[in-house]
Amino acid sequence: MKSNRPVNLDLSTIKFPLSALASITHRISGVILFVGLIFMFWAFDVSLSSPAGFDSVKTTLQDNFLAKFVLWGMLTALGYHCLAGVKHIIMDFDIGVNLENGHTMSQVVFILAAVLAVLAGVWVW
Amino acid sequence: MLQVSVYRYNPETDKKPYMQDFEIDTKGKDIMVLDVLHLIKEKDNGMSYRRSCREGVCGSDGLNMNGKNGLACITPVSDVVKNNKLIIRPLPGLPVIRDLVVDMSLFYKQYERIKPFLINDTPEPAIERLQTPEDREKLDGLYECILCACCSTACPSFWWNPDKFVGPSGLLQAYRFLIDSRDTATKERLAELDDPFSVFRCHGIMNCVAVCPKGLNPTRAIGNIRGMLLNNAT
C-alpha cells in the first residue's frame, strides 16, 4: 500500500456556503479579540497607573489614527463575535437549523455587524 | 464544446497530481457529469472513477464538481457549469488512490464506530419487533443516507480531524439508531460519543446540508445528539 498518497484539499477550489463564511469569520473575529485585548489591557493598565498615564491614553485615543483604528477594529470584531454567538445559541435551541434559515441568519448577522461597525466608527471618530 | 478540467493522478507514473483539460462534445444536450466522464474515458481509457448504479442510489460517484460535492450521475452539467467550464476533482480531504478514486477507509472507520445496527437485549419476539407509525416517522430524513461521503468530505472539522470527529454522515447514522424505538443501547451509544471531538467538533457551518444529494440535514441530527447528551448528563 502506498502511504504517501496526495490529498485534494486546495481550499481555493472549494465553494463554501454563506453559513460557512459566517463561521470562519466568527473564528477570525475571536482571534482578533484575543490578540487585541493584549493592547487593550496594556492601555487600561497605563491609564490606571497615574493621572499622567490616564491623560496620555486619553489623548492617544483622541488624536492617534492608529489607536482609533485598533479600537474600532476591536469593537467591530466584538460586535460580530457576539452576534454570531447569538446565532449559535438560537441554533442550539433547534431553531432554524436548515439551509434556508442558516443562510438567512448568516445574512442577518453580517448586516447587523456592518451596522454595528458603522456605529462604532461614528462613536470612535 | 464543453471545457472540462479533470484532476489526474497515476501513482505509478506521476509524482504529483495535475489538472488535465478536455474538450467534450455534449451534442447540445444537458447531460449528467457522469456522462461527461464516460466521454472522457472514450478519449483516454486510463481515466479512473467509481460508478455503479448511475441513478443516485449506490453513492459511488461522489465528486467535487466546480467546487461543490455531489453525485456525478444525478448532477446535470447545467447545474454546476458556469462560463462553459467544468472542473472535476476528487472528494476533498481523503487520500487519492488514482484520478478521482479516493481511499474511504477513514470515512468507513467512523461509520463502523457508531455501531450502525440495532442493539436490543430484550427477548426476541416470535415474528418481528413492532414500531408505531409515530416512532417509524422519526427515522425519516435519517435512513435515506447512502454513505456517498459528499457531506463528510465537505466538512472542515472532518478534514482536520478525520480520526477523532465522527463527521456528518456518521453522526446522522448515530442519531438514526439513537432515536430508533427498537434500540435499547441508547445510554451506551451516547457514552461512546461523550467527548470533546466525536460530536462537538461540529460548528454548525452546514456545508454538509448544502451538498447532501439526498437533501438530508446532518447539522440538525448533530444538534439533536447534543441535546440527548445534555439530558443524559443531568
Image (cartoon, coloured by chain):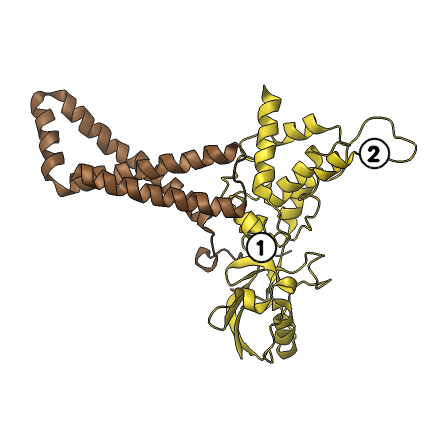
Chain colours: A brown, B yellow
- Farthest residue toward the left? A52
> Which residue is depicted at the point 64% across and 30% down?
B192
Residue A71 seen in this snapshot: yes
Q: Chain of mark 1?
A: B
Q: Is residue B155 visible?
A: no
> Viewer-proximal residue, A2 or A94?
A94
Marks 1, 2: nearer the viewer: 2
Q: Which mark is residue B95?
A: 1
Say which of B79 and B208 sits in front: B79
- The amino acid type of the residue labelled 1 equals Pro
Q: Which mark is residue A47?
A: none
Could you tell whether B5 is left or right of B175 in the image?
A: left
**Above or below for B59 versus A122:** below
Amino acid on which disc 2 is placed: Leu
Q: Position of residue A3 (x, y in %)?
A: 59, 54
Whether residue A106 is situated above or below residue B33 in the rendered picture = above
Instruction: Write the residue at 25% across / 43% down.
Output: A118
Query: Which residue bears the numbered disc 2?
Result: B130
Which quarter of the figure has residue A85? top left
Looking at the picture, tell me which residue is in the foreground, A4 or B155.
Answer: B155
Q: Is residue A94 above or below residue B157?
A: above
Q: Secondary structure at mark 1?
A: loop
Crowdedness of circle 2 by 10 Å Cα count: few (<14), some, many (20+)? few
